[in-house]
């Protein structure tokens, strides 16, 4: 009971579909992502040697938030890369690139990594004015990033190494033991379905990415990405919904949409109405609220 | 799989407990409910012959609301009683007494049935100013009333015949296939747990009442009552919570408490915040609202 049954992510030729119609994960083939396919660790080290990067560092390959099992540390790029590429290194490293003014600006690969910009060709999957951010990702072998979702459509342009990706549709928010937006399921390659029985209700999708693969990850699809070996990718986020729905303060592409934030806040005032009731009766009405919401679920 | 596992409702001697401490169903023994124990159908017929009563009438013993399988019809009491007592009658009858001004006033057995008032002694389970209503109930054999809950504590003072009662704690609102306040499970003596699998999660209680038994039914406990034969009872509702929590328009003792009504209404404005989102994203946030509520469930 440790292998999740999965749908294989389909592979689509870039000329065979309309990007606007894409609503579930797909690996897009037939687009040349450029000279980056010839990148080597040495080339990256030499090109960006003394650039400073802040990266995730952990003693454990499975990065988690609750409790957080990693630190953020700043290295020279060549030092970071030496560690990340070394399969005998006892620590695990993960670079998720940030803008220079990381709290205010979104990551933009072309701006943040001008040395590498010309090497990467981006497929035309959205209109220019929908662009949100592009993120450079470099990972030690075996690093698994916590399962999460973003509120923007994005694609992962995979450049070096291999990555295993699990994906779950938005409705599986009910099945992934989510607390505070974050699923509590990890190590999905060998997960205990006995410990997390709702996983049986999930509709998991799976793929392994090779260099040159472009994985479309729709907004609100949970994804769990594991670098099977030292890996390099760039991913690109864009706004597929009207701009005013997104949180203007969001620099990661994963803050709740404003209507969602407002609904979750409004639920607090709904709950406030029950203040002062004895606990079992409050519990009863919370269950009634749940029933009312469950009746509205459509998927 | 057709017999619900049940806890037997305990029997308590009236002198052995403090009524204020009672929070789960109990059959109260050792209190003499008076001369009503000598009532016979003939006595009731003779005493109230030409009084008019509006009763539930159905071709089916299991009374349901969705769709409603009964009508309300007005009879002379003696005619009603003749039908209700006749086990060969093809129709089923159920009297739930109402005040003369049924829409505005609560039922009050002493006022509505002055002819019978002196025959019934009521146990002192609450303060006089907590009294809400008292209801005379006369039923054909085999009549099962739809499973429901009241928002007031009440006791069923059982006088004639036998009644089988299932009870479920408030938390089982999540397991009883409730739509619009009403469970969708019927015929609980032989219910299909395959069709209603959540019943397996219920904490059912059960008892059979004989004349002289007084069943305490706590507020918000679901109950399903079946007359095993021609039956007569009186039940008494009282307000165990502060008076301002109850809906002043409620004449049945089962309208949602005002905080509950306000919370359920407020949920509509919470849901309004999600208007305009694409269906799958709206569905996603509804599921997030559910998760937030589920985290608050304490029982």
Image: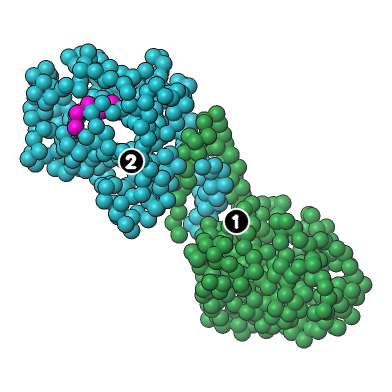
Chain colours: A cyan, B green
Tell me: residue A224, above or below residue B252.
Answer: above
Towards the viewer: B195 or B294: B195
Towards the viewer: A282 or B190: B190
Q: Nearer the viewer, mark 2 or mark 1?
A: 2
Q: Is residue B131 magenta?
A: no
The residue wearing badge 1 is: B178
Q: Which residues are magenta?
A: A154-161
Q: Quadrant of residue A257?
A: top left
Q: Which residue is depicted at the point 43% across and 46% down? A: A174
Q: Left or right: B115 with respect to B213?
A: right
The residue wearing badge 2 is: A206
Across and down, in percent, residue A117 comes to 22, 15
Q: Is residue A159 magenta?
A: yes
Q: Are marks 2 and 1 on the same chain?
A: no
Looking at the image, the residue that sits furthest to the bottom is B38
Tag 2 secondary structure: strand
Magenta segment, prevailing SS (helix, strand or loop)? strand
Q: Quadrant of residue A79?
A: top left
Across and down, in percent, residue B204 comes to 54, 69
């Amino acid at each position: 009971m440790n292998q999740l049954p999965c749908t294989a992510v389909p592979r689509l030729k870039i000329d065979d579909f309309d990007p606007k119609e894409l609503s579930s994960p797909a690996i897009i083939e037939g687009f040349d992502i450029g000279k980056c396919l010839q990148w080597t660790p040495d080339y990256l080290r030499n090109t960006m040697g003394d650039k400073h990067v802040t990266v995730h560092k952990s003693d454990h390959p499975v990065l988690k938030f609750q409790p957080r099992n990693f630190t953020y540390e700043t290295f020279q790029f060549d030092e970071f890369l030496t560690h990340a590429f070394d399969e005998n290194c006892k620590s695990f490293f993960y670079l998720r690139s940030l803008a220079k003014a990381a709290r205010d600006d979104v990551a933009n690969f072309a701006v943040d990594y001008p040395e590498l910009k010309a090497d990467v060709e981006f497929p035309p999957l959205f209109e220019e004015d929908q662009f949100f951010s592009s993120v450079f990702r470099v990972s030690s072998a075996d690093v698994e990033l916590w399962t999460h979702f973003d509120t923007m459509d994005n694609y992962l342009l995979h450049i070096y190494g291999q990555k295993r990706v699990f994906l779950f549709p938005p409705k599986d928010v009910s099945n992934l033991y989510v607390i505070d937006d974050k699923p509590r399921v990890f190590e999905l390659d060998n997960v205990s379905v006995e410990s997390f029985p709702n996983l049986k209700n999930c509709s998991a999708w799976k793929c392994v990415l090779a260099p040159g693969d472009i994985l479309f990850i729709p907004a609100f699809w949970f994804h769990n990405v594991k670098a099977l070996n030292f890996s390099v990718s760039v991913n690109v986020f864009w706004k597929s919904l009207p701009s005013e729905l997104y949180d203007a303060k969001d620099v990661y592409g994963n803050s709740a949409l404003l209507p969602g934030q407002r609904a979750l806040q409004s639920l607090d005032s709904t709950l406030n109405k029950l203040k002062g009731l004895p606990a079992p009766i409050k519990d009863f009405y919370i269950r009634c609220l749940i029933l009312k919401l469950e009746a509205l679920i459509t998927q």
